[in-house]
């Protein structure tokens, strides 16, 4: 029998709350084996591969999450940042390209300073007319990544429709074909469609606000949002 110590039993665990539901959940830091998954994904420079690696790390490190690709993206981002902070430190070195001057700006991001932006009274139920209510799901990795390509926003929107409540019945959109849901969306009026867009615009998101000075000595402000911004 091996005399090597069981190091896994000595790894600390931490608690955090999911932004989408405020549910308390336990997690541990990632180990060398999980860091290898992230490093390989980074070397591939493939967005879908990176999101797949992040999902695998979350599934390994977080209790009660067996499929990280099916939970809201804001929860994925929050969990990965918390795991990363407890694994290798709370500071992220990032490079941001100033939209005004085009120059690269080196940023130092402290993970505890990344805040949740949550619109008051945000709801997943959208009343598009008196007798029709659409129930929405927040975007997930599954809804944003389709095999090796990034889905268009229209595809994501269709995938995020959960149910359609009419005066007579509640229709499960997941039992409909993509073409049927697409036809339903295409026949909305512009104001009705904008109500669905507002759901995405008002969805909870992680943001980091900071100021920086460009070579022309002008102080500017930027708001970074999402893992691609934080680890840019």
Image: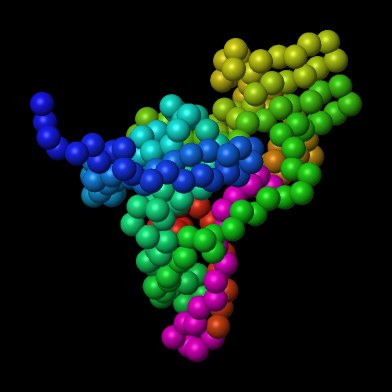
> Can you name the residue that lies furthest to the bottom here?
217
Does 180 lie within the magenta span?
Answer: no
Name the quadrant of the N terminus. top left
Q: Quadrant of residue 69?
A: top left
Residue 199 position, x and y percent, is 70, 41
Q: What colouring style does the render use?
A: rainbow
Q: Residue at x 40, y 53 (%)?
A: 86
Q: Residue at x 66, y 15 (%)?
A: 172
Residue 136 position, x and y percent, is 67, 30
Q: How many marks?
A: 0
Name the quadrant of the C terminus. bottom left
Residue 19 position, x and y percent, is 60, 44
Q: Is residue 228 above or below residue 183?
A: below
Residue 134 relative to residue 78: left or right: right
Q: Residue at x 69, y 21 (%)?
A: 163
For the question of whether residue 193 can be seen, the reply is no
**Along the viewing direction, whichever of 136 and 103 lies nearer the viewer:** 136
Residue 47 position, x and y percent, is 36, 44
Q: Is residue 57 above or below residue 176?
A: below
Q: Residue at x 44, y 41 (%)?
A: 27
Q: Quadrant of residue 177?
A: top right
Q: Is residue 142 above or below residue 87?
A: above
**Along the viewing direction, whichever of 67 and 104 lies nearer the viewer:** 67
**Along the viewing direction, whichever of 22 and 167 lies nearer the viewer:** 22
> Can you name the residue that lies furthest to the right here?
130
Residue 196 relative to residue 26: left or right: right
Residue 33 relative to residue 189: left or right: left
For the question of whether residue 78 can be seen, the reply is yes
Residue 173 relative to residue 121: left or right: left
- Magenta residues, as a range? 202-218
């Amino acid at each position: 029998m091996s005399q090597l110590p069981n190091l896994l039993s000595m790894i600390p665990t931490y608690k955090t709350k999911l932004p989408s539901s405020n549910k308390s959940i336990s997690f541990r830091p990632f180990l060398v084996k999980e860091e290898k998954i992230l490093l390989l994904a980074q070397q591939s420079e493939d967005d879908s591969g990176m999101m797949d690696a992040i999902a695998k790390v979350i599934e390994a490190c977080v209790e009660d999450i067996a499929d990280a690709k099916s939970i809201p993206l804001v929860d994925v981002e929050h969990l990965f940042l918390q795991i990363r902070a407890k694994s290798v430190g709370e500071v992220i070195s990032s490079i941001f390209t100033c939209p005004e001057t085009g120059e690269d700006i080196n940023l130092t991001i402290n993970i505890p300073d990344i805040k949740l932006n949550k619109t008051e009274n945000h709801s997943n139920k959208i009343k598009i007319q008196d007798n029709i209510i659409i129930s929405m799901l927040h975007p997930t990795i599954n809804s944003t990544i389709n095999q090796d390509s990034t889905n268009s926003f229209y595809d994501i929107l269709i995938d995020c429709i959960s149910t359609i409540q009419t005066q007579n019945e509640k229709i499960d959109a997941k039992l409909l074909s993509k073409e049927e849901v697409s036809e339903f969306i295409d026949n909305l009026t512009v104001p009705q469609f904008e109500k669905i867009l507002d759901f995405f615009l008002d969805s909870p998101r992680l943001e980091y606000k900071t100021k920086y000075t460009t070579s022309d000595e002008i102080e500017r402000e930027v708001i970074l949002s999402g893992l691609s911004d934080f680890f840019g």
